[in-house]
Image (cartoon, rainbow, N blue to C red):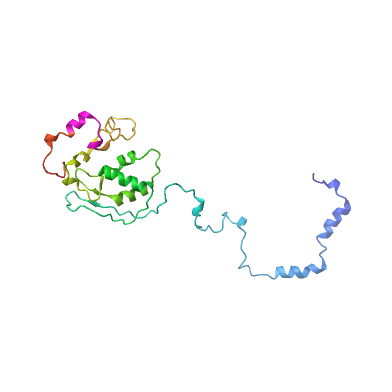
Amino acid sequence: MHAGPSDIGLEDIKNICDFSFDIPENDDEILKNFQSTSNYKHFLVPASFTKHKLIDVQPFPYNPFSIPKSEEIEIESKAIKSISIPFEETKIPHTPLCKQVTKTVYFDMIKNYFNERPIWLKNVLIQSLPEGHNISKNHLKHLLAFFTYSYESGPWRNTYVRLEYDPKSDPQSLIYQVIDFRTKEDIFNTKGPYDYTFTTLPRQQGQLYQLCDIESDKIKQILLNTESIGPDCTVRYK
Protein backbone atom coordinates (compact mmCIF):
# COMPACT_ATOMS: atom_id res chain seq x y z
CA MET A 1 0.00 0.00 0.00
CA HIS A 2 1.48 3.33 -1.08
CA ALA A 3 1.25 6.43 1.03
CA GLY A 4 -0.42 9.43 -0.53
CA PRO A 5 0.31 13.12 0.06
CA SER A 6 -2.36 13.26 2.76
CA ASP A 7 -0.63 10.48 4.72
CA ILE A 8 2.71 12.35 4.93
CA GLY A 9 3.02 15.00 7.55
CA LEU A 10 4.53 18.43 7.08
CA GLU A 11 7.42 17.54 9.32
CA ASP A 12 8.27 14.51 7.16
CA ILE A 13 8.32 16.61 3.99
CA LYS A 14 10.59 19.13 5.68
CA ASN A 15 13.05 16.42 6.70
CA ILE A 16 13.19 15.04 3.16
CA CYS A 17 13.87 18.45 1.65
CA ASP A 18 16.49 19.34 4.22
CA PHE A 19 18.32 16.06 3.62
CA SER A 20 19.22 17.02 0.03
CA PHE A 21 21.09 20.09 1.28
CA ASP A 22 22.38 18.79 4.59
CA ILE A 23 25.59 16.91 3.72
CA PRO A 24 27.41 15.33 6.65
CA GLU A 25 30.72 17.04 7.46
CA ASN A 26 32.88 13.90 7.20
CA ASP A 27 31.57 12.77 3.77
CA ASP A 28 33.23 15.49 1.68
CA GLU A 29 36.62 13.73 1.74
CA ILE A 30 35.06 10.54 0.40
CA LEU A 31 33.32 12.53 -2.33
CA LYS A 32 36.64 14.06 -3.42
CA ASN A 33 38.17 10.60 -3.85
CA PHE A 34 35.40 9.61 -6.24
CA GLN A 35 35.62 12.81 -8.25
CA SER A 36 39.41 12.71 -8.60
CA THR A 37 39.37 9.22 -10.11
CA SER A 38 39.80 9.81 -13.83
CA ASN A 39 41.35 6.51 -14.95
CA TYR A 40 38.56 4.27 -16.30
CA LYS A 41 40.88 2.10 -18.38
CA HIS A 42 40.44 -0.99 -16.23
CA PHE A 43 36.77 -0.46 -15.58
CA LEU A 44 34.83 -3.49 -16.86
CA VAL A 45 31.26 -3.05 -17.91
CA PRO A 46 28.98 -5.56 -16.16
CA ALA A 47 27.67 -8.36 -18.35
CA SER A 48 24.10 -7.18 -17.83
CA PHE A 49 24.99 -3.86 -19.53
CA THR A 50 26.26 -5.49 -22.73
CA LYS A 51 24.31 -6.62 -25.78
CA HIS A 52 25.37 -10.24 -25.34
CA LYS A 53 24.56 -12.56 -22.51
CA LEU A 54 28.18 -13.72 -22.31
CA ILE A 55 31.19 -11.46 -22.70
CA ASP A 56 33.42 -14.20 -24.09
CA VAL A 57 32.29 -17.69 -25.03
CA GLN A 58 35.11 -20.12 -24.32
CA PRO A 59 35.24 -23.45 -26.21
CA PHE A 60 35.40 -25.57 -23.08
CA PRO A 61 36.01 -29.28 -23.78
CA TYR A 62 33.14 -31.59 -22.97
CA ASN A 63 33.33 -34.02 -20.12
CA PRO A 64 33.61 -37.56 -21.58
CA PHE A 65 32.17 -39.03 -18.39
CA SER A 66 28.92 -37.11 -18.91
CA ILE A 67 28.09 -39.10 -22.08
CA PRO A 68 26.34 -42.43 -21.47
CA LYS A 69 28.39 -45.37 -22.68
CA SER A 70 27.06 -48.09 -24.95
CA GLU A 71 28.28 -51.63 -25.40
CA GLU A 72 30.26 -50.55 -28.42
CA ILE A 73 33.59 -48.82 -27.87
CA GLU A 74 33.70 -45.36 -29.38
CA ILE A 75 36.18 -45.08 -32.22
CA GLU A 76 37.84 -41.86 -33.29
CA SER A 77 36.92 -40.74 -36.77
CA LYS A 78 40.12 -40.99 -38.78
CA ALA A 79 40.94 -41.62 -42.41
CA ILE A 80 40.17 -45.26 -43.16
CA LYS A 81 42.70 -46.89 -45.49
CA SER A 82 40.96 -49.55 -47.53
CA ILE A 83 42.22 -51.57 -50.50
CA SER A 84 40.58 -51.28 -53.91
CA ILE A 85 42.05 -52.93 -56.99
CA PRO A 86 41.08 -53.04 -60.70
CA PHE A 87 39.74 -56.27 -62.11
CA GLU A 88 42.90 -56.79 -64.20
CA GLU A 89 45.12 -56.86 -61.09
CA THR A 90 46.72 -60.28 -60.64
CA LYS A 91 48.22 -59.71 -57.19
CA ILE A 92 45.61 -60.37 -54.51
CA PRO A 93 45.99 -58.41 -51.23
CA HIS A 94 46.87 -60.50 -48.19
CA THR A 95 47.26 -57.89 -45.45
CA PRO A 96 45.18 -54.78 -44.69
CA LEU A 97 46.53 -51.25 -44.86
CA CYS A 98 45.14 -50.46 -41.42
CA LYS A 99 47.15 -52.42 -38.88
CA GLN A 100 44.95 -51.80 -35.85
CA VAL A 101 41.23 -51.99 -35.26
CA THR A 102 39.19 -51.88 -32.07
CA LYS A 103 38.08 -55.38 -31.13
CA THR A 104 34.42 -55.30 -30.17
CA VAL A 105 31.72 -57.98 -30.23
CA TYR A 106 31.41 -57.30 -33.97
CA PHE A 107 35.06 -58.08 -34.71
CA ASP A 108 34.64 -61.86 -34.53
CA MET A 109 31.14 -61.62 -36.01
CA ILE A 110 32.28 -59.93 -39.23
CA LYS A 111 35.29 -62.24 -39.40
CA ASN A 112 33.05 -65.32 -39.23
CA TYR A 113 30.71 -63.89 -41.86
CA PHE A 114 33.56 -63.64 -44.36
CA ASN A 115 34.91 -67.07 -43.43
CA GLU A 116 31.53 -68.58 -44.29
CA ARG A 117 31.01 -66.44 -47.38
CA PRO A 118 34.02 -64.71 -48.97
CA ILE A 119 32.18 -61.96 -50.89
CA TRP A 120 29.46 -59.63 -49.63
CA LEU A 121 27.58 -56.56 -50.72
CA LYS A 122 27.65 -54.07 -47.88
CA ASN A 123 23.87 -53.65 -47.69
CA VAL A 124 23.35 -57.41 -47.66
CA LEU A 125 25.92 -57.77 -44.89
CA ILE A 126 24.14 -55.15 -42.77
CA GLN A 127 20.79 -56.87 -43.34
CA SER A 128 22.32 -60.16 -42.20
CA LEU A 129 23.48 -58.79 -38.84
CA PRO A 130 21.47 -59.79 -35.75
CA GLU A 131 18.31 -57.81 -35.16
CA GLY A 132 18.83 -54.88 -32.81
CA HIS A 133 22.56 -54.51 -33.51
CA ASN A 134 24.12 -51.14 -32.74
CA ILE A 135 27.25 -51.22 -34.87
CA SER A 136 28.13 -47.76 -36.14
CA LYS A 137 28.90 -46.97 -39.77
CA ASN A 138 32.40 -45.86 -38.84
CA HIS A 139 33.18 -49.07 -36.96
CA LEU A 140 31.84 -51.20 -39.82
CA LYS A 141 34.08 -49.33 -42.27
CA HIS A 142 37.10 -50.08 -40.07
CA LEU A 143 36.24 -53.77 -39.88
CA LEU A 144 35.66 -54.06 -43.62
CA ALA A 145 38.98 -52.34 -44.31
CA PHE A 146 40.68 -54.75 -41.91
CA PHE A 147 39.23 -57.99 -43.33
CA THR A 148 38.53 -57.26 -47.00
CA TYR A 149 39.44 -55.58 -50.25
CA SER A 150 37.19 -54.49 -53.12
CA TYR A 151 37.12 -54.55 -56.92
CA GLU A 152 36.68 -51.37 -58.91
CA SER A 153 35.10 -53.19 -61.85
CA GLY A 154 34.18 -56.62 -63.08
CA PRO A 155 31.64 -59.22 -61.91
CA TRP A 156 32.30 -58.44 -58.22
CA ARG A 157 32.31 -54.66 -58.37
CA ASN A 158 31.02 -52.81 -55.30
CA THR A 159 31.49 -55.91 -53.15
CA TYR A 160 33.84 -56.66 -50.27
CA VAL A 161 36.12 -59.66 -50.83
CA ARG A 162 37.93 -61.48 -48.05
CA LEU A 163 41.68 -60.90 -48.01
CA GLU A 164 43.75 -63.68 -49.62
CA TYR A 165 40.72 -64.91 -51.58
CA ASP A 166 40.95 -64.79 -55.38
CA PRO A 167 37.50 -65.15 -56.95
CA LYS A 168 38.95 -65.24 -60.47
CA SER A 169 40.69 -68.54 -59.76
CA ASP A 170 37.75 -70.16 -57.97
CA PRO A 171 34.87 -71.40 -60.19
CA GLN A 172 32.58 -71.46 -57.14
CA SER A 173 32.75 -67.66 -56.95
CA LEU A 174 30.31 -67.56 -59.85
CA ILE A 175 27.39 -67.33 -57.41
CA TYR A 176 28.79 -64.16 -55.81
CA GLN A 177 28.61 -62.11 -59.01
CA VAL A 178 26.72 -58.82 -58.92
CA ILE A 179 23.93 -57.82 -61.27
CA ASP A 180 22.67 -54.26 -61.55
CA PHE A 181 18.89 -54.31 -61.98
CA ARG A 182 17.39 -51.02 -63.15
CA THR A 183 13.75 -50.00 -63.52
CA LYS A 184 11.95 -46.95 -64.81
CA GLU A 185 11.86 -44.10 -62.38
CA ASP A 186 8.06 -43.92 -62.21
CA ILE A 187 7.31 -47.65 -61.94
CA PHE A 188 6.53 -47.26 -58.23
CA ASN A 189 5.08 -44.25 -56.45
CA THR A 190 6.73 -45.04 -53.13
CA LYS A 191 10.02 -46.66 -52.16
CA GLY A 192 9.78 -49.95 -50.33
CA PRO A 193 12.16 -51.79 -47.99
CA TYR A 194 15.48 -53.09 -49.24
CA ASP A 195 15.01 -56.64 -50.57
CA TYR A 196 18.16 -58.40 -51.74
CA THR A 197 16.45 -61.75 -52.48
CA PHE A 198 14.53 -60.53 -55.56
CA THR A 199 11.27 -62.04 -54.28
CA THR A 200 9.56 -58.83 -55.42
CA LEU A 201 10.40 -56.22 -58.01
CA PRO A 202 12.85 -53.65 -56.65
CA ARG A 203 11.22 -50.42 -55.55
CA GLN A 204 14.35 -48.44 -56.29
CA GLN A 205 15.43 -47.24 -59.70
CA GLY A 206 18.72 -49.11 -59.46
CA GLN A 207 19.59 -51.99 -57.15
CA LEU A 208 22.45 -54.47 -56.87
CA TYR A 209 21.97 -58.18 -56.30
CA GLN A 210 24.29 -61.12 -55.79
CA LEU A 211 23.32 -64.31 -57.58
CA CYS A 212 23.57 -66.38 -54.40
CA ASP A 213 20.91 -64.23 -52.68
CA ILE A 214 18.26 -64.41 -55.41
CA GLU A 215 15.43 -66.75 -54.38
CA SER A 216 13.35 -66.63 -57.57
CA ASP A 217 13.66 -70.02 -59.31
CA LYS A 218 12.91 -68.61 -62.76
CA ILE A 219 15.61 -65.98 -62.48
CA LYS A 220 18.07 -68.54 -61.14
CA GLN A 221 17.49 -70.73 -64.19
CA ILE A 222 18.40 -67.86 -66.48
CA LEU A 223 21.37 -66.50 -64.56
CA LEU A 224 22.93 -69.76 -63.43
CA ASN A 225 22.71 -71.58 -66.74
CA THR A 226 25.92 -73.62 -66.76
CA GLU A 227 25.86 -73.97 -70.55
CA SER A 228 26.56 -70.26 -70.95
CA ILE A 229 29.52 -70.24 -68.55
CA GLY A 230 32.85 -69.75 -70.28
CA PRO A 231 36.19 -71.24 -69.22
CA ASP A 232 37.76 -67.86 -68.47
CA CYS A 233 36.75 -65.05 -66.17
CA THR A 234 36.40 -61.72 -67.96
CA VAL A 235 35.65 -58.21 -66.81
CA ARG A 236 32.04 -58.45 -68.04
CA TYR A 237 31.02 -61.85 -66.71
CA LYS A 238 32.38 -65.03 -65.19
Give yes or no for residue 221 being in the magenta stretch: yes
| Quarter-of-image position of residue 237 | top left
168 to 47, vertically: above or below: above
Image quarter of the C terminus: top left
| Quarter-of-image position of residue 176 | top left
| Quarter-of-image position of residue 52 | bottom right
- The chief SS type of the magenta part is helix
Residue 32, position as x, y percentages in the image = 74, 70
Q: Give the range drawn in magenta.
A: 210-222
Residue 102, position as x, y percentages in the image = 37, 53
Q: Residue at x 34, y 45 (%)?
A: 109
Residue 160, position as x, y percentages in the image = 26, 46
Given residues 16 and 175, the one toward you in this image is 175
Image quarter of the N terminus: top right
Give yes or no for residue 197 being in the magenta stretch: no
121 to 9, vertically: above or below: above
Residue 9, position as x, y percentages in the image = 88, 50
Given residues 39 and 90, the one toward you in this image is 90
Q: Which residue is drawn at 36% across and 46% down?
A: 106
In this rendering, position of residue 148 left or right of residue 60: left
In this rendering, position of residue 87 left or right of residue 121: left
Considering every residue shown, the one lying at the far top of the view is 218
Tag count in the figure? 0
Q: Residue at x 85, y 57 (%)?
A: 15
Given residues 47 and 163, the one toward you in this image is 163
Q: Residue at x 18, y 40 (%)?
A: 174
